[in-house]
Image: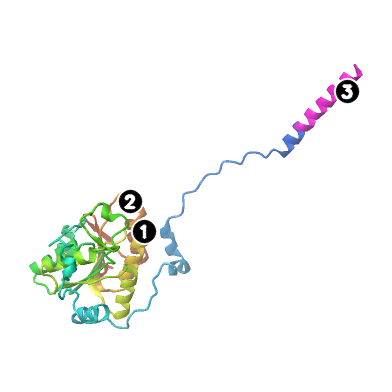
Amino acid sequence: TSKLFTRSAAYVILVLLSYTLGYLSHTSPPQQRQLQPPSPVFQLADSPSQLDNFRVTAPCANSPLPPHLVFPTILDRVFNGSSPYSNFPPPYLSSFLKQKRIKGWGSYGAVFQHLIKRVKPQVIIEVGTFLGASALHMVNVTRELRLQTQILCLDDFRGWPGFRDRFKDIKMINGDVLLFQQFMQNVIYFNATGSVLPVPFSTASGLEKLCEWGITADLIEIDAGHDFISAWGDINRAYRILRPGGIIFGHDYFTKADNRGVRRAVNLFAQMNNLKIQTDGQHWVLDTSLA
């Protein structure tokens, strides 16, 4: 009986100690916190120090080039003084190119005629060109209005990873996709070599160089990368080469990306620069003459 009592007491004491230690070491569940929605990105405009982080500060020319020197400057600095259309296409490329291959998105919207009629631009810069559908449409509009307009098409002409899954007829030679060459063939087909000149670089590096060379435009179209970061960089850099009173506009303001892509970049830029956003179809428009 004595041994049984001793064992029972020891067992009870062990259980009580275990329970006590467990109770003391137990942390109370965290209180439910009311999650606050993130602050709108637009509030950053209230802080000058934060605002500076969003600005593009690459150096630009002290004075803009006159419009009649824009094409000669591009030919000199990009193409060693000769036209890229001369003797195009070379024989080894002829069999790889279609006589014309036009494809674009929103490239024939009424916004082009509306803005060209309003601005009567001497220089247009298109940021994001692909195969040149919207650029060639703008050529037709300027011809109808009897304008002598020069159009610069800024694009690296590489498309995007996997784009050939949808454009299998765009050939590739030794890893070089022939977007640039097909674009040039399209320009030649529409007899627009005197109106359209490519600037075959990334939008970021190309826009900074245009600014450095003093090239400005009356009308700038933004239609390259559609994510926020790409659109934000393109809009900011392009705005620096827009002549006073000019118009900057672009595609994809209303898409399934909603306020996560182009629209977010446009809205933030407009607020930071006190500009009013107008829309025309899927295009956004910032008219600096209304600021």
Residue ID at (60%, 41%): 31
Mark number displayed over residue 228: 1
Q: How many marks?
A: 3
Q: Earlier in the sequence, mark 1 or mark 2?
A: 1
**Which structural element holds mark 3?**
helix
Check the image and tell me how it is coloured. rainbow
Q: Nearer the viewer, residue 232 or 102?
A: 102
Q: Quadrant of residue 20?
A: top right
Q: How many neighbours does mark 1 have within 10 angstroms: few (below 14), some (14-19), or many (20 or more)?
A: some
Mark 1–mark 2 Cα distance, whole angstroms, equals 11 Å
Cα separation, mark 1 vs mark 3, equals 75 Å
Q: In the image, is residue 2 part of the stretch drawn in magenta?
A: yes
Residue 7 part of the magenta-drawn span: yes
In the depicted view, which residue is nearer to us: 132 or 250?
132
Q: Can residue 274 be seen in this snapshot?
A: no
Q: Amino acid at mark 3?
A: Thr
Outermost residue toward the right in this view:
2
User: Judging from the image, what secondary structure is the residue with disc 1 in?
Assistant: helix
Image coordinates of residue 61 in percent, x first then y, are 32, 81
Q: Is residue 257 above or below residue 114?
A: above
The CA distance from mark 2 to mark 3 is 75 Å
| Residues under numbered marks 1 and 3 in contact, where contact means CB atoms less than 8 Å apart | no
Extent of the magenta region: 1-18
Q: As drawn, is 4 to the left or to the right of 187? A: right
The amino acid at mark 1 is Phe
| Secondary structure character of the magenta stretch overall | helix
**Residue on which the image places disc 3:** 6
Residue under label 2: 258
Query: N-terminal of the two: label 1 or label 3?
Result: 3
